[in-house]
Amino acid sequence: MSTRPSLEIAVRASALLGEGPTWDAAARRLIWVDILSSRVHTYDPATGRRTTLATEQHVGAAKPRAGGGLVVNLRDGIGMYGADGGFDWLLREAVPGRRGNDAAVAPDGALWAGTMRYDETAGGGTLSRIGADGSAAEFLPEVTVSNGIGWSPDGRLMYYIDTPTRRIDVFDVDGADGPVVASRRPFAEVEKGAGFPDGLCVDADGAVWVALWDGAAIRRYVPDGTLDRVVELPFPRPTACAFGGADLTDLYLTSARAGLGAFAPPLAGSLLVIEGAGQGLAQPAFAG
């Protein structure tokens, strides 16, 4: 079950809190963020080209937009960068002591965005659905560290992580006139001592891959919740994973140096890749 695959360095970096890898199919590049350094990074594996965008606030996630540019989950709300680099707020809702964290785009093109308190106060965060027009509906009002979000290949299940619970939860998705998300229940639980579940992605088989903060590993759970694979890593704080590359077969991993100080291993904070790890799913762009 445990493996040590060939781990390649995609981008050698010293990110404080690398997060949110996302394959931008239209631009053929990977997008990822360093939350605490307020940076959005891109990486083109075919050419090696890299870009960095400095945001004015801590940035929890950045996702491609259907018309070009990026939607970003910032400290004070949801912002949008146009293809020309111009910035506008889509939804501004500043709450002192709170910031945006992980986010994901649903099959219908809506953004699901989470928040958390800087001090990780229990119940101080939220999970909301943001439409293309900026309309927002708070879905979960009392979460602590809102993290990984993903959907099954048929779009009928939504997976979600509130990190301190140590669980990956699953919801049913239904509704002909718009998504109805309900029936929350545990999908898998990470045992004490194995780390905390952080970001996740879903592959073409419907299996859920999850990064374990302080667990030095990525896990794969098959659709019935059974642990199928443990990928051991040479750094303690992987944060998230996503399939990318031309065929969506390469698994990209973000990682963090925050809190490790002088004990941070050399690869902590870099963007890593495991080539040929599996078969991923194409991710939709934000419809706004």
Image: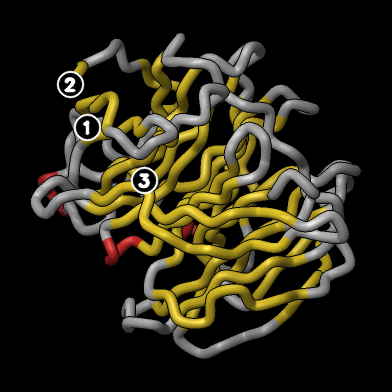
Name the amino acid type tagged 2. Answer: Ser
At horizontal 14% and vertical 46% (from top left) the residue drawn is 194
Vertical comparison of 49 with 86: above or below: above
The alpha-carbon separation of the residues under discs 2 and 1 comes to 22 Å
Q: Which residue is mark 1?
A: 266
Q: Is residue 35 left or right of residue 57?
A: left
**Mark linked to residue 42:** none
- Quarter of the figure with residue 27: top right
Q: Residues within 10 Å of mark 3 (few under 14, many from 20)?
A: many
Front tag of 2 and 3 = 2
**Mark linked to residue 2:** 2
Q: Residues within 10 Å of mark 1 (few under 14, many from 20)?
A: few
Q: Is residue 70 left or right of residue 48?
A: right
Provide the secondary structure element on which disc 2 rests: strand
The alpha-carbon separation of the residues under discs 1 and 3 comes to 16 Å
Evaluate whether residue 99 shows in this view: yes
Q: Residues within 10 Å of mark 2 (few under 14, many from 20)?
A: few
At horizontal 84% and vertical 55% (from top left) the residue drawn is 176
Q: Earlier in the sequence, mark 2 or mark 1?
A: 2
Q: Residue furthest bottom?
A: 96
Q: Are marks 1 and 3 in contact (CB under 8 Å)?
A: no
- Quarter of the figure with residue 103: bottom right
